[in-house]
Amino acid sequence: MLKKIIALTLVILMILPMVVSCGSEGEAVSTTAPILGNASSGDDKLTEEEKKERAEIMAYVDELAEDNDFSGKSFVWIGGGSQAPTDSEETGDVAQDALYYRQRDIEEKFKISWENYQPEAIEGGDSGTHPVVEVVKKDVMAGSNAYDAGYGTPVAVCQPLFSNNTLTDAGTLDGIDFSNKWWTASLLDTYHINGATYFLNGAIVSSNYTDTHAVLFNKQVATDYNVGDLYSYVKDGSWTFDKMFEVASEIPKNESGAGAYRYSAPNGLAILYANDYSITRFNTDSTPYVPEAYPKELSDLSDKFSAVFGDDAQTVHTKGVLDHSTAESFEEKYDGFEGTQEMFVKNNILFYFATTGAAADLREEDVEFGILPLPKGSTAQENYISFAEPWSAFNVFVPKTTKDPTVTGVILEAMAALGLRYIKPAYYDNLLQGRSTYDKASKDMIDIIFETKVYDIIDFLVKDGSNNGDGAYVRTIKCAIQETNQGISSRYKMQARTVNNNIADILKNIENDK
């Protein structure tokens, strides 16, 4: 009963700040307090809602610890990399300290020994394989039960772990409760493969707060062209792509290249998902597939968006994504600018499509900007949909040889809960803190962005992807909103068939292992 009360209270408390903040539009609020406060900040710097949320999270973890005394037991986290503390004490780096506070709390509350293990390449191993893959595969084959859970990045690291049958269904672990707010809400909708959940995502990893696509707007350009109160459109539900195009039309088309542009080139998957278009589909038995005939809805979206995002007078972009032989030089095309971020900083772009991680980096630059969710496809669409990059999605895994599934499940649940307590405020602070002020209205927008985030497993299912790039099918889909249908449809069918063949091979391996 206590667990249900805590979970319900968390939901209420996370919604409440959005409700009470609607009266303040775009003002900058002078403050030094993070959203939930870090471990060393005093309670006097927190709002009452933030104090309650912090208390509820800690009460939940305390309850878990009371029910699970793991004295004398160990937990080995392999391949943590950026998701493991590098020091055994506070350093002043808010991101690293958040990981340190989390590990400290878990060790103290559960009386467990925690080890972070970062493997080096195995002598004689496959030079093209990440050390984490080599070590985990070897451990599973030997049945040595050396590693309990881990984190691998990028996607190409975890893909071979999955396809080589080395992972367990994390959804079967005692202690994990996917209904809690610290797990990605769309987890069960987009992660199930053959009814199993092999990867975990949410507040358990810091990449959860750097991976999600949003729209940044340059406040100087917005003022110069009198585009209006953009935050109000989001709040009243009228923030659609048509509204964005209407607003941006206040800027004349930039035929000469001398003035401001309306847009930077967006991520095609993000735009399609914002329009409620799903790339990967699921059969009734939860097996994934992609349509092999060129979908009409994709064709319609391509027609609509390529007219805008493929127009050099409106959108900053270079050619060559699909065909590298036609690649252009950005600096030559845009008179010495090194990239779209620099153009945005120099007040040459109104709407900049970027991830939340890029937004945090921009807080170090001399530019005033706001953050908005990706627009809806239409006002009839119920919710905003914020697409998140797969490089952060399919990384937290549990080897089949985890030595004690109950310990592993409980510790992963505690990691996720304490991630909401420590990691979220650290990264919200990075997103919102602009020297001595942060953008209060953008905080409300970021809440919406993270509450509506979705993933797609397509990058995980293609065979021709790499550590540094997408496979051919994904590149084609991404370019559908910038290229004409003539350029996309001819590539689509063959690439879709290849993806489905690869999915069939993966599912066959899983079936043979049961």
Image (tube, rainbow, N blue to C red):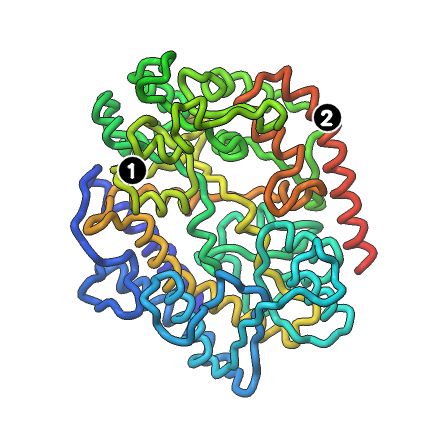
Can you tell which mark lies on residue 89?
Answer: none
Q: Secondary structure at mark 2?
A: helix
Can you tell which mark lies on residue 370?
Answer: 1
Amino acid at pointer 2: Lys
**Mark 2 neighbour density, 10 Å: few (under 14) some (14–19) many (20 or more):** some
Quadrant assignment, res 465: top right
Cα–Cα gap, marks 1 and 2? 40 Å
**Mark 1 neighbour density, 10 Å: few (under 14) some (14–19) many (20 or more):** many
Q: Are marks 1 and 2 in contact (CB under 8 Å)?
A: no
In the rendered image, the residue lying farthest to the bottom is 72
Q: Residue at x 64, y 21 (%)?
A: 488
State the quadrant of the N terminus: bottom left
Q: Nearer the viewer, residue 178 or 214?
A: 214
Q: Residue at x 63, y 18 (%)?
A: 487
Drawn side of residue 196 relative to residue 20, left or right? right
Q: Residue at x 35, y 30 (%)?
A: 343
Residue 51, visible in the rendered structure: yes
x, y percent for residue 350? 32, 27
Identify residue for label 2: 493
Amino acid at pointer 1: Gly
